[in-house]
Amino acid sequence: MQVDLHTHSTASDGKLTPLELVERARASGVDLLAITDHDTTAGFDSLGDASFGSLRLVAGIELSAKWRQQTIHVVGLNIGRDRDAIHEAVAVQQAARRTRAGIIATRLAKQGLGNLTDRVEALASRISIGRPHIAEMLVESGAVRTVDEAFRKYLGSGRIGDVKDEWASLAQIIDWIRAAGGTAVIAHPEKYQLTRTRLRELIADFRAAGGEAIEVVSGRQAGPETRALATLCEQSGLSASSGSDFHQPGQHWAELGSQSAVPDGCRPVWERW
Ligand code: AMP
Ligand code: MN
Ligand code: MN
Ligand code: MN
């Protein structure tokens, strides 16, 4: 079975509409798909109760959380539609995103990179705004040539646009997901550049707060990384998830449904649904 439990649509920083995303996933042979936009369920919600043949769609969200001065992404899977806890989570996180985007725009303006405030506010009123959108605005204005350059110079870790203390705590994020009937998953654990010791601490804190799974298979990450995460997963007694983190066609490291299988010995998170 081909499973992809981490994808983005135009409701956040993905390039395909929710319908295009589902169609592409189906054409790629995905049987079980979660749309997990950053801090919103609007993409999934827009599909209503439509059915997609052999493809089963699961409600999801990717919430940004604060853990020890660091941002950690938590994927919430199989959450109940229209649950108060998810509405609250989305409201709090969207307010944080709007505030943060405004701060970033102000900082960029001070650097002489142009005034993006109005455009940022207009976009934030329609979708879940993130740094990739601001990066694109910098490309359009000619301040940088590529999105990658925008992250390297202005928006990436340690740069002026790296504003990260706005998110809800890891424990709060997990509480919201659980209260909405969902399963909390640590997204792309290899992306935080944590030492093994710190990753173990994150997993311990996550588990103590009610988190239930780790994204053991993330995009087309290397085999040794997957095996190391599988070991951590087994040792901690958590379940394993699998997701591409697809944002747009053409990113070969994150194409829909192209991940390897979850290693033997790991309990797949979707078995409980
Ligand atoms: P945000 O949600 O505003 O914190 O932005 C994080 C998002 O930016 C991630 O989900 C990625 O989609 C994207 N991103 C992070 N780093 C880069 C990068 N170096 N180049 C392009 N996109 C990036
Ligand atoms: Mn993203
Ligand atoms: Mn993420
Ligand atoms: Mn993601």
Image: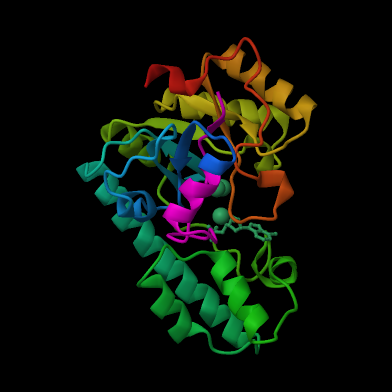
Direction from residue 165 to residue 121 in the image, left or right: left
**Residue 45 placement (x, y as % from top left):** 31, 50
Compared to residue 11, the image places residue 77 above or below, namely: above
Q: Residue at x 59, y 79 (%)?
A: 137
The residue under the point 50% across, 36% down is: 5
Tell me if residue 160 comes above or below residue 187 in the rendering. Answer: below
Total number of numbered discs in the rendering: 0
Give the magenta part as a residue range: 1-25
Q: Position of residue 52 (x, y in %)?
A: 39, 40
Image quadrant assignment for residue 199: top right
Task: Give the position of the C terminus as an image quadrant.
Answer: top left
Res. 264 visible in picture: yes
Quadrant of the snapshot with the N terminus: top right
Q: Quadrant of residue 53?
A: top left
Asked which quadrant contains residue 189, the reply is: top right
Depth check: 221 or 130 in front? 221
**Is residue 70 in view from this perspective?**
no
The residue depicted at 72 percent of the width and 21 percent of the height is: 227
Question: 23 above or below 258?
Answer: below
- Whether residue 5 is in magenta: the answer is yes
On the rendering, which quadrant does ligand 2 occupy? Answer: bottom right
Residue nearest the observer in this picture, 53 or 7: 53
Q: Determine if the magenta segment contains residue 89.
A: no
Residue 118 image position (x, y, % from top left): 44, 85
